[in-house]
Amino acid sequence: ALVSSGAKGLLLGLKLVPEDMPPCTVVLARDGKLADVAPQLPDARACVLLPYFEAIAGAKMVQGKRVEGGEGHGLRKEFFTTMSTDSQRKWAPPSAASARAE
């Protein structure tokens, strides 16, 4: 029987991240880059990310850093939007300023 692409995606997601796998907490600056996050990601397998953005006035502490309040899908969406934008920027043509620095 044929399986729709949506069903394949759902099955793949269930297969990649085990149900008992704790989320991977990631703390970064609001203007953080993909390179800043990479050392915080696990090497072993896929996981659900639990991102937090650093904030000087934040009341919540995560990994010894003050972070913005809130958690869940909103922060995760902002995190992936920021990381996607950064990854696309890496493939842009080099600017004149970076060419002079080399």
Image (cartoon, rainbow, N blue to C red):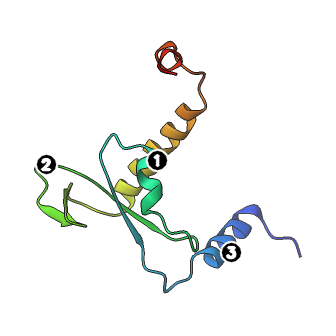
Q: Position of residue 55 (x, y in %)?
A: 18, 49
- Outermost residue, right side: 1
Asked whether, in this view, residue 36 is left or right of residue 15, the answer is left
Instruction: Report the amino acid beneath label 3.
Output: Leu
- The numbered mark, 1 or 2, whose residue comes first in the sequence reads 1
Q: Position of residue 13 (x, y in %)?
A: 62, 71
Q: Is residue 99 above or below residue 26?
A: above
Determine which residue is flagged by label 3.
11
Determine which residue is flagged by label 2.
56
Determine which residue is flagged by label 1.
35
Q: Position of residue 75 (x, y in %)?
A: 35, 55
- The numbered mark, 1 or 3, whose residue comes first in the sequence reads 3
Asked whether, in this view, residue 100 is left or right of residue 45, the answer is left
Seen from the viewer's position, the closer of residues 37 and 102 is: 102
Could you tell me which secondary element the residue under label 1 belongs to? helix
Where, quadrant-wise, is the N terminus in this rendering?
A: bottom right
Instruction: Report the amino acid beneath label 2.
Output: Ile
Instruction: Report the amino acid beneath label 1.
Output: Ala
Q: Are marks 1 and 3 in contact (CB under 8 Å)?
A: no
Q: Identify which residue is drawn at 47% across, 47% down.
A: 34
The residues bearing labels 1 and 3 have C-alpha atoms spaced at a distance of: 30 Å
Q: Identify which residue is drawn at 35% across, 63% down.
A: 72
Q: Is residue 83 above or below residue 37?
A: above
- Outermost residue, front side: 102
Asked whether, in this view, residue 88 is left or right of residue 69, the answer is right
Seen from the viewer's position, the closer of residues 1 and 12 is: 12
Q: Is residue 68 above or below residue 18?
A: above
Which quadrant would residue 73 be assigned to in this image? bottom left
Seen from the viewer's position, the closer of residues 99 and 9 is: 99
Q: Identify which residue is drawn at 71% across, 69% down.
A: 7
